[in-house]
Image (cartoon, rainbow, N blue to C red):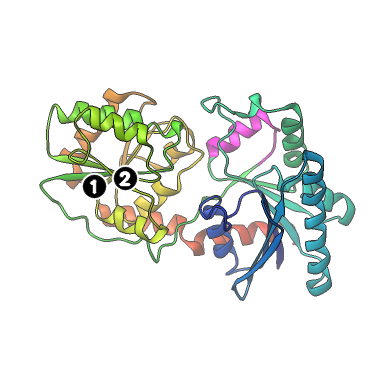
């Protein structure tokens, strides 16, 4: 099967992390179908990058100088039209299009469906349909909400990374049947190693440190727990925000209880997780959480907030759930994790997660969904 991926987010030379989870999904699906990715980046130059990732995955990234809103919109559609013309000249019509994040790429899918009768699938990752976000769906412009609804309503299939996200979209966007297909984990990197029990128990948090990740709450919880016991450390990986460093320093926790590692490579994240015993995610909301999947694949139980898609990943066999913004609850669960850690079967945690989130598993699910469009 031949599928064009229209990606609103995708890694590029200006931002190698944005949409990296989409890129991993593309690699997974390319084991089962011929995938061509197209993505447009508005920046300070005009350029085109074509990357052949493997025999069934090609990425075309267009870099276009920013202009007015109208000129940007014209360029966006025109570049996709250029891509489609080249594609059809070399491969003929695709079996379907796959939209990753409804806006902006979904507008192109609507256009291609209308003019060329091409079916399309929408996959949503974005936790925008939640009032915890400052820029949540209902606060967006009338045009944004209208176009998102049109993209979703006219999609031949809808997939989300969690049931929670699909339910939220049904409430706010359109009543539509959806299929849950998870994000994917590179299990050649994130695989089981037996956790090493040390005198100092190591928690790890990995994120981009934006406000909804609630780093402040993690630091406050660590301070409360430190008043009870001194046999743990919290390692924080991701872009360092000076405000959080200052908070940790003022609480006299910096480098002794709270350790900031900064940004690391995707490969190094696997190493950092394996050197820890447990992950903490204390976000205000999560549509899913790639890092929780990665932690579980390594056999590391997680403490997560009981909200959104992330709560669907954790049960009594692989971690604990905590109430949103409840630092006392997080302290209690951190205590439990340290004291009852040996009750977790870490090898089984890894086996179960790899069976669900590996490239083969996720790729096959998308391929089977594509086949329903072309029975």
Q: Which residue extends farthest front?
A: 44
- Magenta span includes 320: no
Tell me whether the residue at label 2 lies in contact with that at label 1, contact meaning CB atoms closer than 8 angstroms. Answer: yes
309 or 270: nearer the eye?
270
Q: Position of residue 281 (x, y in %)?
A: 37, 38
Magenta span: predominant SS is helix
Left or right, residue 329 beside residue 92: left
The residue shown at (39%, 50%) is 263
Q: Quadrant of residue 161?
A: top right
Q: Which disc, if any, is residue 318?
A: 2
Name the quadrant of the N terminus. Answer: bottom right
Find the magenta span and give its range. Answer: 163-177
- Name the secondary structure under disc 2: loop
Q: Position of residue 2 (x, y in %)?
A: 72, 67
Above or below, comparing residue 203 to residue 17 in the picture? above
Left or right, residue 212 beside residue 179: left
The residue shown at (49%, 56%) is 184
57 or 62: nearer the eye?
62
Q: Which residue extends farthest right?
A: 115
Q: Give the class, few, some or many, for how many residues have Cα within 10 Å of label 1's Cα (few <14, many ≥20).
A: some
Q: Which disc, if any, is residue 344?
A: 1
- Name the secondary structure under disc 1: loop
Above or below, comparing residue 204 to residue 25 in the picture? above
Left or right, residue 145 beside residue 362: right
Q: Position of residue 374 (x, y in %)?
A: 75, 61
The residue shown at (38%, 37%) is 241
Q: Which residue extends farthest bottom?
A: 55
Label 2 or label 1, whichever comes before in sequence order: 2
306 or 136: nearer the eye?
136
Q: Position of residue 110 (x, y in %)?
A: 80, 47
**Residue 331 visible (yes or no):** no
Q: Which disc, if any, is residue 229?
A: none
């Amino acid at each position: 099967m031949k599928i064009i991926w229209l990606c609103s987010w995708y890694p590029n030379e200006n931002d190698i992390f944005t949409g990296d989870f989409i890129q991993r999904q593309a690699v997974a699906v390319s084991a089962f179908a011929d995938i061509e990715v197209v993505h447009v980046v508005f920046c300070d130059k005009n350029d085109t990058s074509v990357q052949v990732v493997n025999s069934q995955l090609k990425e075309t990234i267009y870099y276009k100088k920013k202009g007015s809103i109208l000129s940007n919109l014209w360029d966006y559609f025109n570049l996709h039209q250029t891509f489609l013309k080249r594609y059809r000249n070399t491969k003929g019509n695709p079996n379907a299009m796959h939209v990753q994040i409804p806006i902006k790429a979904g507008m192109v899918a609507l256009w291609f469906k209308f003019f060329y009768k091409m079916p399309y699938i929408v996959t949503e990752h974005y936790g925008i349909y939640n009032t915890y976000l400052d820029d949540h769906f209902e606060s967006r412009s009338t045009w944004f909400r209208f176009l998102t609804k049109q993209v979703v309503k006219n999609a031949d299939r809808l997939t989300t990374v969690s049931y929670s996200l699909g339910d939220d979209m049904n409430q706010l966007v359109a009543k539509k049947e959806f299929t849950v297909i998870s994000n994917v984990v590179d299990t050649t990197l994130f695989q089981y190693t037996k956790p090493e029990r040390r005198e100092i128990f190591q928690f790890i948090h990995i994120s981009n440190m934006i406000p909804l990740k609630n780093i402040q709450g993690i630091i406050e919880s660590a301070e409360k727990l430190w008043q009870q016991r001194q046999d743990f450390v919290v390692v924080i990986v991701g872009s360092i925000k000076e405000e959080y460093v200052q908070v940790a320093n003022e609480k006299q926790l910096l480098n002794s209880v709270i350790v900031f590692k900064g940004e690391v490579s995707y490969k190094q994240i696997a190493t950092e997780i394996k050197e820890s015993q447990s992950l903490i995610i204390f976000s205000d909301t999560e549509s899913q959480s790639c890092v929780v999947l990665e932690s579980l694949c390594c056999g590391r139980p997680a403490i997560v907030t009981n909200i959104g898609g992330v709560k669907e990943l954790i049960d009594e066999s692989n971690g604990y759930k905590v109430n949103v913004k409840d630092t006392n609850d997080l302290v209690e669960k951190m205590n439990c994790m340290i004291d009852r850690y040996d009750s977790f079967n870490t090898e089984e945690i890894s086996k179960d997660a790899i069976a669900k989130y590996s490239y083969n598993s996720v790729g096959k699910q998308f391929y089977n969904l594509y086949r329903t469009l072309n029975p």
